[in-house]
Image (cartoon, grey):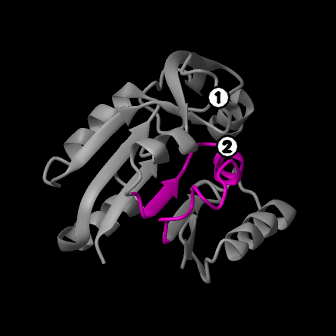
Amino acid sequence: MKYNILHVGCHDGDDDIYSFVSENKDNIECVVLVDANPICIEQTKKQYAEIPNCEFECLAVLPVPIGGLSIDLHSPVGQKSSTVSSVIKDFVTTHSKDINTDTFQAKTTTLKELLAKYPETNYLSVDTEGLDVLNLFSLDSVDYGNIIKVSFEYIHSDGTISFGGDKLESLLNYFSRLGFKEFYKKQFNIYCEK
């Protein structure tokens, strides 16, 4: 099996997707790494310097299109390189435990638009800092057609942000209806495989 990975919310590149790619180099055709924060994209480029066939996109991924317009993203004060940047200010303030945030502008896209641009994607990873569920639900069965593996963050590494209960159950039921059969948790992520 050769993987074409779309990793949305790659942050600084030092995460489970990097580990997967490093361990499976011979089975990776392409890795597309997307993050809204240009500083994180630069860090990710350094992290993936030894990995062939990588593409980088500096975009904020939203569940609905807004015509590619730019949008304000929030990050902890003085930490524009933070891996926690979100369109949802409360997400950042809860995580950073500071009510103040810095903002920066990022161009936007959707998962649907990214999958249209990279139709060979068969492994989708989503960590969009508070928008994971909405982004994953924004795709229909046609969008998930080629995808055999999905991973998404369901709890933040510091435990401040998580979703579970009805939201998580609804999302997993949705994936089950789409033909995903294997579900497991590893660290802060949930994995779904066909």
Query: Looking at this view, is 180 or 34 the one in front?
Result: 180
State the image coordinates of residue 174 (x, y, percent, origin top left).
74, 67
The span picked out in magenta is 121-148
Q: Are marks 1 and 2 in contact (CB under 8 Å)?
A: yes
Q: Residue at x 26, y 56 (%)?
A: 30
- Give the quarter of the image for residue 86: top right
Q: In the rendered structure, which amino acid carries the disc numbered 2?
A: Gly
Residue 59 horizontal side relative to residue 158, left or right: left
Instruction: Give the percent coordinates (x, y) of residue 33.
Output: 36, 45
Residue ID at (13%, 53%):
50
Q: In 3D space, how far apart are the residues under numbered discs 1 and 2 (Cα atoms)?
A: 8 Å
Q: Quadrant of residue 35?
A: top left
Element on which disc 2 rests:
loop
Q: Who is closer to the viewer here, 189 or 56? A: 56
Rendered position, 41 above or below 52: above
Q: Which residue is mark 1?
A: 87
Q: Residue at x 31, y 38 (%)?
A: 56
Q: Is residue 10 left or right of residue 63?
A: left
Give the side of residue 69 with respect to residue 10, left or right: right
- The single residue placed furthest to the front in the displayed view is 142
Q: Nearer the viewer, residue 125 or 180?
A: 180
- Residue 79: horizontal and vertical position, in percent? 47, 26
Badge 2: how crowded within 10 Å, few (<14), some, or many (20+)?
many
Say which quarter of the image contains residue 143.
bottom right
Residue bearing the label numbered 2: 130
Q: Main secondary structure of the magenta part?
A: loop
Q: Position of residue 190 (x, y in %)?
A: 59, 69
Q: Earlier in the sequence, mark 1 or mark 2?
A: 1
Q: Is residue 72 visible?
A: yes
